[in-house]
Amino acid sequence: MELYVTRQESYSRGELILRTLFGLLYIAIPHLFLLLFIGLWSSILTFISWWTILFTGRYPQSFFEFQVKMLRWNLGVSASLYNLVDGYPPFGLNAENDKIKLEIPYPESLSRGTLLLKSFLGIFYCILPHAFCLYFRMIWSAILGFIAFWAVLFTGNYPEGWHAFNVGTIRWSYRLNLYIGYFMSDEYPPFSGK
Amino acid sequence: MIETEQFHSIPQPEDISIREREDAMGAYLMMFAAIAAGLPLPIINLIASIIYYFINRGKSLFVKFHSLQSLLSQIPTSLINASGVFWAIRIIFYGAEFSNLFKGYLVFIGAVNIVYVIFSLIAAVKARKGNFYYFILFGKIAYLQTYIVKEVEQKIDVNLPPKL
């Protein structure tokens, strides 16, 4: 999986303040309202895909592509809300967002055994260890995000290391979701945001 | 390919890509949408089938046929289930009688759903193999709607004098 969020050379202070004060109203609510329904559809497709993988060993390609598009849309909104990029995230599954990149290779076959393993024992060997590590990483991400807000406000520049770290946190959680939430990958997610 | 005069040719399994087969199979699995969404409302299945049909009808005639057949067969099942749910709500929340008629209706709902699930699963497996499977009545309607060749009438723009 490839997940990138472009780090801009300079960030707009005006947009930063606008997003911080009213981002919930003009970015989060409209996007998340639509993503709620898209997410509902996605959960239906995930459920069906689970059975399809179990019986055929394949994730239906159309369903897979839908999930990737939804995740891409989601990523665009998240990147904007976390102040990682400027600009308004585009609406729609097919919308182009040149500030983010999310590529997930389609697996021609998926293991039925791994599917059953992660469905019934995934909480022990995957969710708990990753959630434990991600919990602390997310706290640190939130702190960095808060400090980065002031850095952008005064300098117009998002420190590169902090940006990479916060994008890494998103990347880690996406990898985890792909493996255990969407069953779109058989590759155990690494304990890293790189 | 089997050619007929009024209908589009029926594709054979070797002509149908794996992607089309999976999309066609997915149409029948929409019967589990309510379970997947975590909402025990039969109407969810119907809505999911409608959405699925409109998303996929342009992909190929094979996918369109199976999506439409799934949608058409979903309509009576959903209505039967939904009326059962409303009846149950009246009994639970509005004190309507838990009558023998309702018990009979529950058995009827159970039977209908078992038949529906069995036939839908058979159709899903057939679709995955690239085959057609025709339900009684709905199969014929879906086939006619999908495979009939619709002739487009060309309207010739002719100027005419006023009617006197």
Image (cartoon, coloured by chain):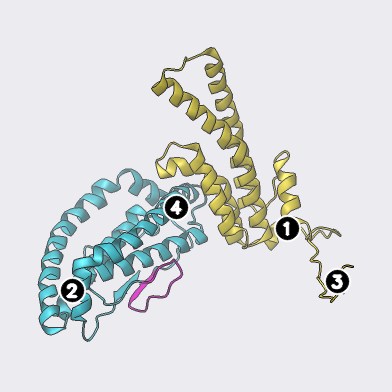
Chain colours: A cyan, B yellow
The crowding category of the residue bearing disc 2, from other C-alpha atoms within 10 Å (few below 14, some 14 to 19, many at least 20), is some
Q: What's the magenta region? A: A90-103
Tally of numbered tags:
4
Q: Is mark 4 on a helix, strand or loop?
A: helix
**Mark whose residue sits in front, 2 or 1:** 2
Tell me the number on the disc at residue B162: 3
Relative image position of residue B162 (x, y in whole percent): 85, 71
Q: Is B68 located above or below residue B9 in the figure?
A: above
**Mark whose residue sits in front, 1 or 3:** 3
For disc 2, the marked residue is A17
Could you tell me the amino acid type at mark 2? Answer: Ile
Is A99 magenta? The answer is yes
Tell me the number on the disc at residue A41: 4
**Residue located 16% across and 83% down the image:** A157
In this view, the residue farthest toward the front is B164
Can marks 2 and 3 be said to lie on one chain? no
Could you tell me the amino acid type at mark 3? Answer: Pro
Residue A189 in sight here? no
- The numbered mark, 1 or 3, whose residue comes first in the sequence reads 1
Chain for disc number 3: B
- The numbered mark, 4 or 2, whose residue comes first in the sequence reads 2
Q: Which of A161 and B64 is in front in this view?
A: B64
Cα separation, mark 1 vs mark 3, equals: 55 Å
Q: Is A49 located above or below residue B87 in the figure?
A: below
Cα separation, mark 4 vs mark 3, equals: 55 Å
Chain for disc number 1: B
The crowding category of the residue bearing disc 1, from other C-alpha atoms within 10 Å (few below 14, some 14 to 19, many at least 20), is few
